[in-house]
Amino acid sequence: MKEGYRPTGRGLLAGSTALVCALPVALLVHAIQAHAGEHAERALPVVGTVLLAVVVLPVLLTAFNERRALAPARLALLALIGLAVGLTAVFLVRAGAVIRFPADILTWSESDFVNDILKFRVGYPLYTANVNNESFTYPPATQLLTYLLAWLCGQPTSIPFFRAVQLGFSVVAALVAFSGCRRLVALSGRLETLRDARLWHALWLPMCLLFATNPLTNGFGQNLHDDALAVLLCALAYWLLLAHVAAPSRPGLIAMALLPALGFLVKQSLLIWTPLYVLQLALFDRPRVPRRVVGFTAASVAAIIGVVATCDAVWGAPFMYWVVTVLGHHGVSPLRSLQHGLDVWPYFFVLLLGGGVLVRGRAAPTLLGPWVVAAAVLTLEAYTSGVAWMLNHMGPGSLLAGVWFLAALPRLWPRLVVQRPRFRVQAWARAGVAVLLAGLLWNGLGLIRIPTPPFSTDAYRYVAQIEQEFTGLPARQVLLDAGTWVYLAEGVVMKDRAPAIGERGYSATGDFSGILQRLHQKHYAKILVRNFHSPDFWYDHYLWQHSSGIRAAMAANYHEVRRIAKVEGQDLPGPGRYLFSEISVLAPNE
């Protein structure tokens, strides 16, 4: 084994203690907000006081106990830990509100995610013909694993439990990233001499969770989406890479060869880990073993071919269409990719900073490869994010950048805080400035959230009014553009969903003859669609190269009988705002 990685339970205990401390703080903040009711902003001074106490009290207690032996650097580190705990508590409060919400309309993917679970429950094929407009453009592993865990816990149809599972994936990703952080410090030769090791471990774990769920690039960590499990697998892939660098082994190489193929079942982009691993083996391993590079490449590619061939045998051409063809036709906008890269510049900055601090001296040959791989992940994700307007493509890379930053921080901290000042007041001033700079950087990284609910209670009114439209009618006769919770009880797999049509209208790969025929036949007794009178209409969007004709067909064969008002006072990202917008209720013309 290369220079010193010795797993220890003490570091994990310190980190877990800090993470657990966030729970009572989160409960207290939630109670304060619940007492404020609809006026959550009025509770902000009280919530702010609680969070300030979380930062200040450990510092004051330590200062009181140590008195003359006060170390400004240590107290500043305690303040950082308190800030990380407070920020984690705020995240948990907001995540709790998201998890408890009963309808799967908090982002565009939730409806299709639950639809896959529903299909599996009733024995319906996960991938069907293009004209049905009812399939998901992601592989099924996350959905099926979520359902398995929910079924084992006696919650097979609970949407809140499905979301709790995604949060669990994010927590495990943070644990894996925490271990990767320790490995980086060990490979740099500094773990055994790390001062205040327990305090650094107490900072790393909550920070890893904040990176894994940051709203800038990892905003779907508690939503029904493949991102949480994909981030976990990327963290595991990087952990395997660091383990290989520390001590190459045949079991480790086998795991590395299999992971991209298994990752494909979660998200197509995880296939990128095969060339990334080959990059490490071919250019940065010492000694370089050509036979190992060839054997690994052949084994990993064979595993990928085997998984794809198995999926093709199970689901046939529809699987290849939905999972490969549709997303494969999404063009990348270089200008949008550049803009997204600039939007997340703090993550490139901390990755460069971490590399500059750790890839030096005797550790440089060992750590150069892992740093290049992390930089390649973030850069490639920034490029591929140009296919859409959201930044979640860069979630895994941002977590790896955070790991490098956290691993470098113990070496940066003494330079920021203690430089043998001539006067003690100078040491205290430097400590305060260091904490302030850290807070500003964390805000740039998207780790600081305003402690207010993500949406108002008016969202529950919105859900209730949607459910009322199904009263007295079989669920299969009412088309809701997005949201599957209303179909779960009757086990109805509904065709013609807006997310499925929107994906294929944007990439110009859809056959919409099926829905056009059903509209002309007045197949549905009622249709509920959002933004029917807006250019931003997922069935017939103004940015598409060609109109789908769906809006015109709806207008020709149905008429609007009423509207469900949009949700007031919500603070969701773009897709969530759309799914909380005004709904037109359409009835067939006589």
Image (cartoon, helix red, strand yellow):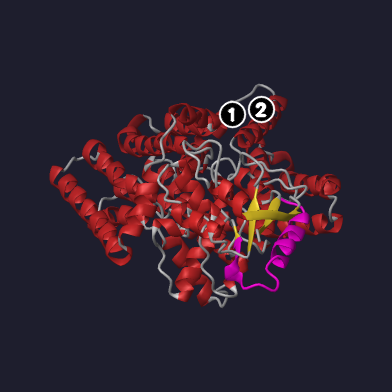
Query: Mark 1 and mark 2: span between their CA atoms?
Result: 7 Å
Residue 158 x %, y %: 60, 70
- Which numbered dot is residue 41? none
- Count the marks: how many? 2
Q: Residues within 10 Å of mark 2 (few under 14, many from 20)?
A: many
Residue 464 x %, y %: 74, 64
Q: Residues within 10 Å of mark 1 (few under 14, many from 20)?
A: some
Residue 313 x %, y %: 27, 64
Query: 447 above or below 323?
Result: above
Q: Nearer the viewer, residue 138 or 514?
A: 514
Q: Residue furthest top?
A: 422
Q: Which residue is mark 1?
A: 416
Is label 1 in contact with label 2 (beta carbons under 8 Å)?
yes
1 or 2: tag closer to the N-terminus:
1
Query: 110 above or below 204?
Result: below
The span shown in magenta is: 455-479
Q: Quadrant of residue 458?
A: bottom right
Q: Quadrant of residue 433?
A: top right
Q: Which residue is mark 2?
A: 430
- 242 left or right, relative to 488: left
Q: Based on the picture, tell me whether residue 474 belongs to the magenta stretch.
A: yes
